[in-house]
Amino acid sequence: MNDAATFPRNAWYVAAWSHEVGRREPLARTVCNRHIVFWRKADGAVAALEDACWHRLLPLSMGWLEGDDVVCRYHGLKFDHKGQCTLVPSQGKPNPSARVRAYPALEKFRFVWVWPGDPALADPALVPDLHWNDDPEWAGDGKTMFAKCDYRLLVDNLMDLTHESFVHATSIGNKHVAEAPMTTTHSGRTVTSTRWMLDIDAPPFWRTQLGKPGNVDRWQIIRFEAPCTIVLDVGVALAGTGAPQGDRSKGVNGRVLNTITPETDATCMYFWSLLRNYKLRDQSLTTQLREANAGIFEEDRMVVEAQQQFIDRNPDQPLRNLDIDAGSMRARHIIDDMIKGEAQTAAA
Amino acid sequence: MNDAATFPRNAWYVAAWSHEVGRREPLARTVCNRHIVFWRKADGAVAALEDACWHRLLPLSMGWLEGDDVVCRYHGLKFDHKGQCTLVPSQGKPNPSARVRAYPALEKFRFVWVWPGDPALADPALVPDLHWNDDPEWAGDGKTMFAKCDYRLLVDNLMDLTHESFVHATSIGNKHVAEAPMTTTHSGRTVTSTRWMLDIDAPPFWRTQLGKPGNVDRWQIIRFEAPCTIVLDVGVALAGTGAPQGDRSKGVNGRVLNTITPETDATCMYFWSLLRNYKLRDQSLTTQLREANAGIFEEDRMVVEAQQQFIDRNPDQPLRNLDIDAGSMRARHIIDDMIKGEAQTAAA
Amino acid sequence: MNDAATFPRNAWYVAAWSHEVGRREPLARTVCNRHIVFWRKADGAVAALEDACWHRLLPLSMGWLEGDDVVCRYHGLKFDHKGQCTLVPSQGKPNPSARVRAYPALEKFRFVWVWPGDPALADPALVPDLHWNDDPEWAGDGKTMFAKCDYRLLVDNLMDLTHESFVHATSIGNKHVAEAPMTTTHSGRTVTSTRWMLDIDAPPFWRTQLGKPGNVDRWQIIRFEAPCTIVLDVGVALAGTGAPQGDRSKGVNGRVLNTITPETDATCMYFWSLLRNYKLRDQSLTTQLREANAGIFEEDRMVVEAQQQFIDRNPDQPLRNLDIDAGSMRARHIIDDMIKGEAQTAAA
């Protein structure tokens, strides 16, 4: 694991929530081992530069903003959003070679995305679909979790929700998840795993959301889009009211948006958001669900960080797979292919 | 020091006090770079497995116990004390190859012992004699000290007690220890160093234990058993009452049991216990002696950790030996031979 | 940067303030990767030995002083200021080979200096001139800053004071520093950069010191002496009263003494002192200036440590130079030559 890249660079990665990038202060983030400073211009567009002054390598994120430019805190060099140095105090016009690397960046679905790879390939159409996050038909909010692990351990975690029965035994899990069969399909850069649990007791969380007694049909539809975005379509409906056939009107439905950005080979930022298509104007419910979910994800963080610690101490010991890992195996396969493709391009 | 093993693996090492291994929660310990989970079965026997689930390497010590088995917190895989996986939820019967390494373990003298090397060689008769720890003719208690150093620095420390005069100048040390001659003998896997200090002032600690005025004959008989167990036979008797000739009836006698288990090349667990053959039912004295000794051993910890820090920064600088190091030199020689023997077996 | 030495060893480096080295306790310092213990003898002379006992490498700085010698805390070995072991308890006369390395050390200008390189070259005449620090015509005091960076980043910092305009924008800096031209000269082991700012607003600090209204002529004369000592001659005088021509009588004048001692390749000790030639007996002003300056230098520490962190993560990315770096480029050139010279001597 140490000798090879653990992530492709030619992909859009979430670097921040939209509200974290403003016009007052630059923001430092690390994406795929690239140290990047973000800020927002007067026209609202996001700028993203290598976070090191051309001159003496001080992080530009330690500086400040002037108009649309960022100013280095050390000697006052100023850089525009393209990375061009526009002012060197106490010297004439800056040399055109005085520039730092600019990264393609854009804002979509309440997130700021950056492309750490080849700029020529940065097609905005490749941003994964997370439209629920700013769709007026859906309500909800999320947070960011910083985890000390390879981002792929969180992909594994999300691709197999049977772990709910054990990691989250006291909250969202019960035995039905681990016992229900799952079907997995894939095409190109996506993997979809579907699990239906018919006529079961609702676990405590969903019981409360539904607000009705009686057994339920429960679903979990997991859709992975390479390299690191996973949308969970989850919900319950009263048993036998047609949910498996497409009629979810007697149920409640959520989307859990997950996108996990590698910072380095062994750390990552996990951006998640929890959306629902009911009680849209209940801000108190939004807050309650967000905070409850944050607590649940902390249970996952303990697990994946403990895995990473073992892997660090025993780099040759393999991860092994069970039937439940069909989805994560496929997802990792797609990621590996992307990494190999970039290595071949670089070698050529 | 970095290129070679610092410990043999074919030996019994103390991993825990007996009372630390129970039926409620698994216990994680590291012995000779092996991460091991311990628990107790209904019949009282101790189980010891590699502390990583066969499936995704989560430490099993993060899971819980069900009957005689341990359950992984991540996906609920269950393992028996032999390391065999006995249940994979949401899948059929586990594959027989789904197993983790089991380590020979046993309980003796109030300690749990583990054999991190070749199981075929794990002869229970090789457990070092620490019988004083549960002998009704002796009373006392001990603790565990976790030290950031090569365990051999603590072996050195214990094999030469002249350091009492300097490291423990204000408690058990006085100049007589450093001035008295020592004789050293050895055979096979043991080294014995004997020092008699005749007709001397008793140091404060022993004065209190003896409870009588007058000069004393003091003895320190240090017995090392490879790779890391050292029993100190220590005491004082009124001077001239025959202690050197074998009559200790006019004195007080203690045994300091020490066994230092390497966790890694640069950290160790030091288990010690302080036994006496007088005032056997005085629990208050037991507690007082244990706590006083814990304070004294903290002085040693400062010394050996400072040595380790210097060694880490200056790996090529040799330790040098004086006459007082005859015992530790011999002990290290035996340890080195065990390590070399294992390396030759591994190469063959 | 990782493969080559970052400092010459044949030079005098400040290891401590004079008052830090006493007769009660030994002091541990690291200079050029050498761990050194300092203490003071009865005649007032400073002793400096390798900070590791010949026997078992315990830092001698953990021991205590007896007369003019230092005693190891572990087994009581005693060493004189030449490094010769003079006592091994419980053994006969020490072997003459039982000795630790002694370093040339001396005391001058309220500092203790040490020569970590070849003792034969340790000429006291090579101590850089910091006489202002104990000259009765000057008053002031200083402190020590421990910084986690290559000492040369602090040399760079001091050789170019235009950073005052940005790093210290709210205290001593204003735009005039960055805008004023600078001239640089050099000879042998020194570099001198001079900047005059004529007929300008005084920045807040100097306004207060001068205590008079009106524009000023301000000067900054930076004198580097290899490898790491920089004296700043700084001050302001009422504009047009002849300061540039040599008449500073209508102004206030300070000397900022700076000497930065590498501890390791990535940490250093920065000793500084702030002297003035006015209000000599105002101890309250001395304290106020010292504390204010300590706060200003904390701003520099944040900058140089952030540079070092980026350099550590991106060792191949070059520092680049502007016109304002003429002084630091020349200073680094001299340092590099000293390092190369030592490498050639070592190879020969």
Image (tube, coloured by chain):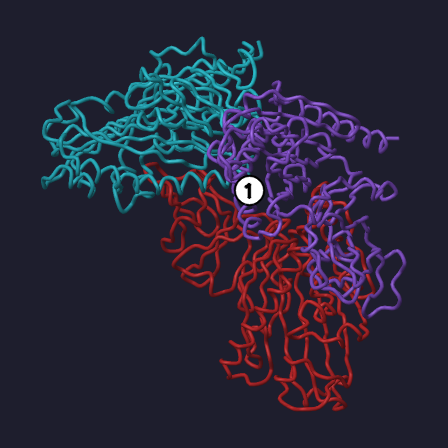
Chain colours: A cyan, B red, C purple
Is there any visible trace of residue B6 in the rendered image?
yes
Of C302 and A111, the residue lying toward us: C302
Q: Where is residue B73 in the image (x, y as percent from the top left)?
A: 38, 45
- Badge 1 crowding class, 10 Å Cα cut-off, few under 14, some 14 to 19, many 20 or more, is some
Query: Which quarter of the figure is the N terminus of chain A placed in?
Result: top right
Count how many numbered circles sit on residues in the image. 1
Chain bearing tag 1 is: C
Q: Which residue is drawn at 58% across and 64% down?
A: B271
When the figure is inspected, residue B294 is found, relative to residue A169, above or below; the finding is below
Amino acid type, mark 1? Asn
Front-most of C218 and A330?
A: C218
Disc 1 is placed on an element classified as: helix
Expressed as whole percent of the image width and height from the top left, the position of residue C133 reads 69, 46
Which residue corresponds to mark 1? C293
* Residue B214, quarter of the rendered image: bottom right
Q: Position of residue B153 (x, y in %)?
A: 69, 57
